[in-house]
Image: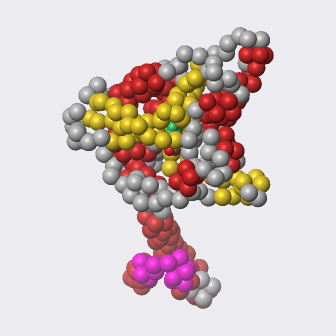
């Protein structure tokens, strides 16, 4: 029976050498197939005597079973190997660090606008919002700046469709048109009381927003921000402007170590007019006068265009630059950084 033992080990090594299911099935055919060696041996039994058939047949069956179980073993081994390769290919490394989803934040100028709104809000000012595409009337004429006024040349802007041929619509050059827009609405609501000789609640409003001029360098951008302020009543004076604006600056910069200067200036819509400069008494900016706003007492013609009697109503207005305030607050030296959208810059304000 050595021959059968040899055949079993021959089959076993043939199976071992098969590395794919197809190779294994081919190897199987050599032993267990229709003309495989075991099958041939079975056929040979026919010529033997009954006794020999019995003993030989039993021995062949033992060999056959040994080969079949070797085959099953190998099949299982190949399937397991295949599974392992597949698992490796689809491996998920749960120890890898997660992918970060960085949190966004408000733009530094937005932070400044929020701050301005909060501070003026605490002083009883409303916040108003208006169109960036403005008519010639609101941007200039209503603000005592008629078509031939030389002050218009300092406000060159981008003209757009709409309006009339000699007074086309434009991208607003300042937030001052909001003085008129807001006051007209306010006065409309209190028209009846005013006509009956009664008073109206004071107009106290700020109007932050985007403004446009043909200007571009390290401290000027064709699109920039302004915040208008307006306070109109029956007994509002320059003293109130000084008080409110000084309070604002000290709160905004979180410093009482700060002085203001009102430097005589000119705007068509205020009379008298002043530029407001601030000076820090300590810190990196100490000792320099820094211009932060234009201001003045609202011109009688403008008060009239608000629908009010300038003999009765008086007040002041100011227009400041939130971009400039942001630069001063954070020590930014180039205005254009605010509008480049570079995350390396912006993420520092998160
Ligand atoms: N609108 C003026 C400017 O843009 C600033 C200003 C506003 C001045 C209100 C006086 C009063 O330069």
Viewer can see residue 98: no
Report the residue at 49% width, 59% height from top: 215
Q: Name the one closer to the observer, 305 or 208.
A: 305
Q: Which residues are magenta?
A: 14-27
User: Is 192 on the left or on the right of 158, as rendered?
Assistant: right
Above or below, 50 relative to 86: below
Which of the 4 image quadrants contains residue 307? Answer: top right
Which sits in the foreground, 235 or 183?
A: 235
Indicate whether residue 342 is drawn in magenta.
no
Residue 17 as seen in the image, left or right of residue 37: left
x and y percent of residue 81 in the render?
A: 44, 68
Which residue does the image show at 45% across and 78% down from the upper left? 19
Q: What is the magenta segment's predominant secondary structure?
A: helix
Residue 85 pos. (x, y %): 45, 68
- Residue 22 on the magenta segment: yes
Residue at image coords 54%, 35%: 270
């Amino acid at each position: 029976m050595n021959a059968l033992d040899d055949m079993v080990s021959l089959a076993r090594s043939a199976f071992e050498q098969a590395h794919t299911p197809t190779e294994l099935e081919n190897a199987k055919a050599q032993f267990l197939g229709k003309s495989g060696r075991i099958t041939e041996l079975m056929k040979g039994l026919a010529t033997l005597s009954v006794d020999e058939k019995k003993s030989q047949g039993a021995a062949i069956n033992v060999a056959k079973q040994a080969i079949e179980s070797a085959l099953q073993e190998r099949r299982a081994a190949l399937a397991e190997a295949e599974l392992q390769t597949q698992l490796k290919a689809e491996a998920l490394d749960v120890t890898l660090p997660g992918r970060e989803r960085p949190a966004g934040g408000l733009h530094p100028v937005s932070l400044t606008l929020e701050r301005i709104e909060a501070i003026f809000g605490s002083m009883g000012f409303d916040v108003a919002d208006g169109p960036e595409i403005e008519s010639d009337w609101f941007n200039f004429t209503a603000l005592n700046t008629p078509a031939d006024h030389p002050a218009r040349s300092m406000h060159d802007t981008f003209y757009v469709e709409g309006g009339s041929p000699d007074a086309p619509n434009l991208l607003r050059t300042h937030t001052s048109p909001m003085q008129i827009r807001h006051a007209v609405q306010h006065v409309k609501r209190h028209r009846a009381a005013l006509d009956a000789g009664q008073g109206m609640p004071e107009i106290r409003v700020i109007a932050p927003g985007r403004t446009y001029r043909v200007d571009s360098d390290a401290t000027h951008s064709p699109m920039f921000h302004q915040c208008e302020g307006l306070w109109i009543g029956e007994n509002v004076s320059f003293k109130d402007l000084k008080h409110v604006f000084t309070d604002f600056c000290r709160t905004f910069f979180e410093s009482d170590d700060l002085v203001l200067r009102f430097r005589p200036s000119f705007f068509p819509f205020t009379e008298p007019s002043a530029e407001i400069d601030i000076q820090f008494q300590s810190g990196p900016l100490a000792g320099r006068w820094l211009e932060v706003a234009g201001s003045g007492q609202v011109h009688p013609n403008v008060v009239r265009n608000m629908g009010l009697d300038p003999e009765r109503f008086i007040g002041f207005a100011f227009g400041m630059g939130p971009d400039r305030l942001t630069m001063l607050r954070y020590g930014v030296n180039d205005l254009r950084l605010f509008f480049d959208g570079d995350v390396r810059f912006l993420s520092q304000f998160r």
